[in-house]
Amino acid sequence: MAVEVGDVAPDFELKDQHGTPVKLSDFRGAKNVVLVFYPLAFSGVCTGELCQIRDELPTLGDADDVQVLAVSVDSMFALRAWAEQEKYQFPLLADFWPHGGTAQRYGVFDETKGLALRGTFVIDTEGVVRWKVVNAIPDARDIDEYRKALAGL
């Protein structure tokens, strides 16, 4: 079942690239969240998308108001190596076990390939999904759309 605009975003707790648990609900009342699902670390399109987020994060909104959470089925160890290589400062969350469980709850898991589609959900401070886009695995997302969605909150 896919998560739609207007739905309360399903809560989850996943470990980041350092092994620190991150809960979506921890940001309620404090920050808007840009929840970015991507297929795999170290792949070309994923690296391009996350580097663009890294480079343009200051233009997405006030750092005190916006939190990016990036989620893939990779292990915490792979995510740490990738984050160090690319100098990502936002959490990379391991949806490793149960394999793709969070992506499944959001309706962006490709059962055949065993990885997430390119789904992004903008979640407001009340935990409600205010914007979403889901692209096929080879199709990069447009960061300008994230900016527009956040500006509308």
Image (cartoon, helix red, strand yellow):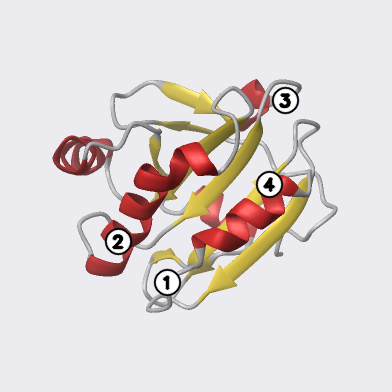
- Label 1, on which residue? 140
Mark 2: which secondary structure?
helix
| Alpha carbons under labels 4 and 3: distance apart | 16 Å
Give the residue displayed 62% in from the left and 66% down from the top: 133
Q: Nearer the viewer, residue 148 or 5?
A: 148
Camera-side mark, 2 or 3: 2
Residue denoted by label 2: 48
Amino acid at circle 4:
Leu
Q: CA distance from mark 1 to mark 2?
A: 8 Å
Q: Residue at x 77, y 51 (%)?
A: 130
Nearer the viewer's eye, disc 4 or disc 3?
Answer: 4
Residue for point 52% across, 43% down: 59
- Depth check, front residue: 123 or 72: 123
Distance from disc 2 to disc 4, alpha carbons, whole Å, reads 21 Å
Does label 2 or label 4 sit earlier along the sequence? Answer: 2
Quadrant of the image occupied by residue 87:
top left
Q: Report x, y in % for residue 3.
A: 72, 58
| Three-letter amino acid code of the residue under disc 2 | Gly
Amino acid type assigned to the residue bearing label 1 in the image: Ala
Quadrant for the N terminus, please. bottom right
**From this viewpoint, which residue is outermost toward the right?**
6
Numbered label attached to residue 27: none
Helix, strand or loop at label 1? It is loop
Q: Label 4 belongs to which residue?
A: 150
Q: CA distance from mark 3 to mark 1?
A: 28 Å
